[in-house]
Amino acid sequence: MSNVPPELEYTDAHEWIRRLPDGIAEVGITDHAQHALGDIVYVELPDLGRTVSAGEACAVVESVKSASDVYAPVSGEVIGRNDALETAPEAINQDPYGAGWMLRVRLAPGGGDAKTLSAAAYLDLLGKESD
Amino acid sequence: MAMREPTIFECGAPGRGASDQWPTPSPDALADIPPQLRRKRRPALPEASELDVVRHYTRLSQRNFCIDTHFYPLGSCTMKYNPKACNQYAMLPEFLGRHPLAPAASSQGLLRCLHELQEILKSVTGMGAVSLVPMAGAQGEFAGVSMIRAYHRSRGDLGRDEIVVPEAAHGTNPATATMCGFRVREIPVNADGDVDLAALRAAVGPRTAGIMLTNPSTLGVFERHIVEIEQIVHGAGGLLYYDGANLNAILGKVRPGDMGFDVIHMNLHKTFSTPHGGGGPGAGAVGVSDRLAPFLPIPIVGEDRGSFRWLDETDLPQSIGRLSTFMGNVGVLLRAYVYVRMLGRDGMRAVADHATLNANYLCARLAALGYDPAYPSRRASHEFLITLKRQSRMYDVSAMDVAKRLLDLGFHAPTTYFPLMVPECLLIEPTETESRATLDAFAAAMARILAEMQNDRDQLKSAPHAMPVRRLDDVRAAKQLDLTWPGAPAGPVSASP
């Protein structure tokens, strides 16, 4: 069963959001997503300073099976990116909610208001998908 | 089988070679090259005799999985048999020896063949005009979406910067839209495999340049709401692009032009049986409705009272231009021409009949064995999707395990993990050129694999066993590419003369 930490928020496209202090959100892909993708071999991250809006494709994760877009779950400016993924993309497989984080976004006014799922709601979604 | 074949570097011995067949350089061959740019040592080429070379490459060719030796049910790729006659006629010395700059007056035979091919493709797709020049499917897509852009611009309709693409589309569709300067709007498909019409309605508007659609879709089912989709997209001022990847299923049955599509690319190497795989040469002819005809890529073949000539920028001043130096991959176009002439109108329908019959027969056989079709309520088109989600949970096996084991059993693997939205999937396309006996043999192999999931899992998980190489480490293969022969000399060439 997938690991879904209760303190995070989620999207139906399998991204997670961690709310940090000062209106900053950390973003990555879920344990379920990394498992479905398989071994990840390449990650493309947005440039620092880029403005992303919720729902927009902002990163690419390439596995041995396919390349998939990662959608920004919030709107704002990219102020941090996990450059370690460039040489060690497998961190997303090994530790999706920790060392596998992808970007940090400074939320635009109202930028964090996009509809996200609680851990319980996301678990519910995974249950439905596996029926 | 399965003995390791050495590389060509290991086949010979130092000093061996057919030295009397080497080219003799003229005394002034190096005159134009400054001394500091001339190499000081001979390159590290393999040193092998003619017989070493012949045996090495013959052995390699015998290890190839190809349509001439094996069933090749690679979904979405239409790996049908290419009749040898197509090759034979396209290789007539009069075609092969023709110079691409030969004047039209001395190329009437070739131009007539290409003109007839244009007309036949127009007729079978229901489009108003055809250009044969795109050199591959991807270039056909590029030409098609470039024409959509040119059309909107010619009307001064400059705000249309989005292309709608369903989530199950071939990856080339969003790539093409992006290459042509558009933003991609992805829309979902519903549980039955049809486009989600509510999501489509919400996605289209004054920014919609068009939609790129494959029908039948990459899920192996016919898009049943195509009439509504046409009304929604045209109603919003957008155009409809038909990705011809799956044209084989509907050949002679329904026509993209009648469904309301404005532009289509045809993979001649799939549906029209020209050589396929290995990266080319391909041919991605495009067809358009009348309103897009002025923008077709040039040159196209025009006819005036039985005489043929190339139409160029003077005839089509609004053309998106040239896509290659001359007139596309003529050799490939000739093969397609012979193929469509051999098929005729009835033959086209027979292609679609047998392609869909074979797919539905094989799908039913696999379902009876205990495999799960991904869309059990739908009739398959020319291909179908099996999902191994249940087996993956019960036996901890993957679609990749099944694909590798099929190689041992003498079959090319189906397409795996595409479309990715269907977990642990195999996309299987038997094509119309396979006999029922071949389909039954494939079903028997799949039955054996299903039994191995329960009784001999190790055999399955460690497959292939009978191939020249065993299971490859696909992570290392993607991350640590090493394509250099280690015997080649490293470091700079000696500076001494």
Image (cartoon, coloured by chain):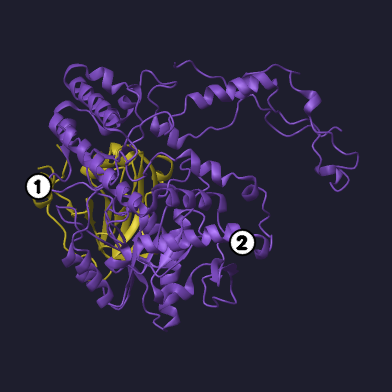
Q: Amino acid at mark 1?
A: Lys
> Residue shown at 90%/42% (left/top)?
B28
Nearer to us: label 1 or label 2 = 2
Looking at the rendered structure, the secondary structure element under dot 2 is helix
**Residues packed near mark 2 inside 10 Å, few (<14), some (14 to 19) or many (20 plus):** some
Task: Give how far apart the Cα atoms at labels 1 and 2 are.
Answer: 63 Å
Q: Are marks 1 and 2 on the same chain?
A: no
Q: Is residue B60 above or below residue B388?
A: above
Q: Which mark is residue B108?
A: 2
Q: Is residue B160 left or right of B38 when viewed as pictured?
A: left
Q: From the rendered image, report the letter of the chain displayed in yellow.
A: A
Looking at the picture, how far across and down is residue A7, in whole percent? 15, 49
- Label 2 resides on the chain identified as B
Q: Amino acid at mark 2?
A: Gln
Q: Farthest residue to the bottom: give it.
A: B156
Looking at the picture, how far across and down is residue A22, in whole percent? 26, 62
Q: Where is residue B209, by image quadrant?
A: bottom left
Looking at the picture, how far across and down is residue A59, in whole percent? 35, 54
Q: From the rendered image, report the letter of the chain displayed in purple.
A: B
Q: Nearer the viewer, residue A16 or A131?
A: A131
> Residue shown at 34%/51% (left/top)?
B348
Q: Which mark is residue B494?
A: none
Q: Nearer the viewer, residue B346 or B273?
A: B346
Which residue does the numbered mark 1 point to in the structure image?
A128
Q: Where is residue B300, by image quadrant?
A: bottom right
Looking at the rendered structure, the secondary structure element under dot 1 is helix
